[in-house]
Image: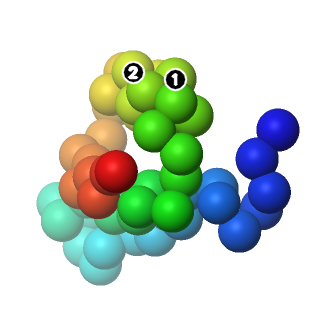
Amino acid sequence: MLEPARWPQVKAAGEAAAGVAVDALATPAAAWNTLKPLLDALPVKLVLHAP
């Protein structure tokens, strides 16, 4: 399990059309590789900042 400090940070980026920003730069690559397909399946626009 990841320490909370290493969890991806998710923030609304303003207007709905702007999407949701996901900052996962502090998230280990292995955890990100598991999480990314789940985020890709969401019906919202995402701006990903990943390792």
Q: Which residue is mark 2?
A: 37
For residue 16, which quarter of the picture?
bottom left
Return the mark for residue 2: none
Residue at point 44%, 56% (across, down): 24
Q: Label 2's element?
A: helix
Residue at point 32%, 28% (across, down): 40
- Residue 50: image location, x then y, percent: 33, 51
Q: Looking at the image, which is closer to me, 18 or 30? A: 30
- Residue 36: image location, x then y, percent: 40, 30
The reply to whether residue 8 is in sight is yes
Q: Which amino acid type is marked by label 1?
A: Thr
- Residue 33: image location, x then y, percent: 43, 27
Q: Which residue is mark 1?
A: 34
Reply above or below: 47 against 42.
below
Residue at point 31%, 41% (across, down): 44
Residue at point 34%, 51% (across, down): 51
Q: CA distance from mark 1 to mark 2?
A: 7 Å
Foreground mark, 1 or 2? 1
Reply above or below: 2 against 17.
above
Q: Looking at the image, which is closer to me, 36 or 28? A: 28
For residue 47, which quarter of the picture?
bottom left
Report whether 1 appears left or right of 8.
Answer: right
Q: Residues within 10 Å of mark 2 (few under 14, many from 20)?
A: few
Q: Which amino acid type is marked by label 2?
A: Pro
